[in-house]
Every structure is written in structure tokens, then in C-alpha cells.
Image (cartoon, rainbow, N blue to C red):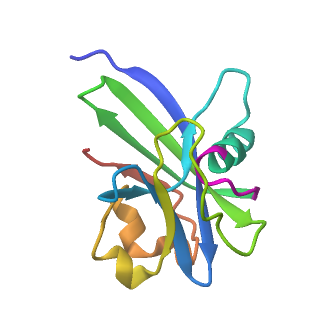
Amino acid sequence: MQDYTLQVTARALIVKNRKLLLVSNDYKLWYTPGGHLKPSEMLPECMIREVKEETGIDVKSNQIVYVSEFFDKKYSVHKVEVYFAAEICVDELPTHWLDQDGLVKTSQFFDIEALKNIHVVPAFLKSGKWLDFGLDIYQGSEKR
């Protein structure tokens, strides 16, 4: 059996006018803003920091709404992703923001119909569960 390194990430589900904020580094694959937890960092702090780094916007952390996990065989990583509902603290996204780590190239809001036409991960985002958070927090694992 392959040895995997555990990696925990905190991600934001930012919904405005029934649209979900996603980011991309190549305009092909879209995902929620968020990133790796640093040692001695709390999950909500990580999510807030990562959203700011990737999009330039400030958010307020609300409750954990989903947990997802997957095994990335390419990098030998077992990734656990914790999704927070987050409130956006601005009316519009910055137009000329550059990700501090240089990975994210763009951010955009998508409605449920638009999600059907793009490659978005994790796949459960296409179901629109982010429009109405329920009791089924654990989303299981998927192959990536």
C-alpha cells in the first residue's frame, strides 16, 4: 500500500445572489477558494487567509458545512477538505487582483446552471447543495 501524507485544507463556500464563487489557475478547472492549513493555525483563520490571498476579498467565517476527502496518487497526498460557509464583506470582486502565491489567475461567480458546463471540483458542487446547507456534512471521497 502506498504511503500518503495527510494534508488538511480549509475552503470557502461564498454564495452571493445564488451564485457560488470559484477560482481557477488555468480557466479550465474551477474550485472554491482555500488552501493548506499551516501549523498552529485554526481552520477558520486558514480559510479567511486563503480567500484573501487568492481573491483579495475579506470574508467572515460561518459554520463548517461540508467535509470531503480524496487520495491524490500523483503527489501521494490524502487530502481532507473542510468547507466553511463564508460571508463576503464587499459588493464586488477586485478586478486587478494577483494571487500572492501566483496560482489563482481568476475568480468568478457561477449559478447552478453554469456549473453544469464547466469542470469543477469537487463534483458535489454541481448538485447545488451549497444553495441550501443540510445535515449531510460528510461528502465522502472521490477519485481525482
Q: Is residue 82 above or below residue 62?
A: above
Residue at 72%, 66% in the rendered image: 88
In the picture as drawn, the residue positioned furthest to the front comes out as: 96
70 displayed left or right of 32 = left
> Percent from the top left, x then y, of residue 101?
54, 35
Q: Is residue 66 above or below residue 132?
A: above
> Percent from the top left, x then y, of residue 2?
24, 17
Query: Which quadrant of the structure image shows residue 84?
Result: bottom right
> Percent from the top left, x then y, of residue 29?
32, 56
Q: Is residue 48 above or below residue 115?
A: above
Residue at 54%, 58% in the rendered image: 137
Query: Which quadrant of the structure image shows residue 72?
Result: top left
Q: Quadrant of the N terminus?
A: top left
Compare residues 38 and 70 and report the one nearer the observer: 38
27 displayed left or right of 6 = left
Check residue 67 for magenta coloring: no
How many numbered marks are there? 0
Residue at 51%, 62% in the rendered image: 107
> Percent from the top left, x then y, of residue 8?
53, 33
Q: Quadrant of the C terminus?
A: top left
Region of the chain picked out in magenta, as a range: 53-60
Compare residues 29 and 18 and report the one nearer the observer: 29
Query: Which quadrant of the structure image shows residue 24?
Result: bottom left
Compare residues 92 and 141 and report the one nearer the observer: 92
Residue at 60%, 65% in the rendered image: 95
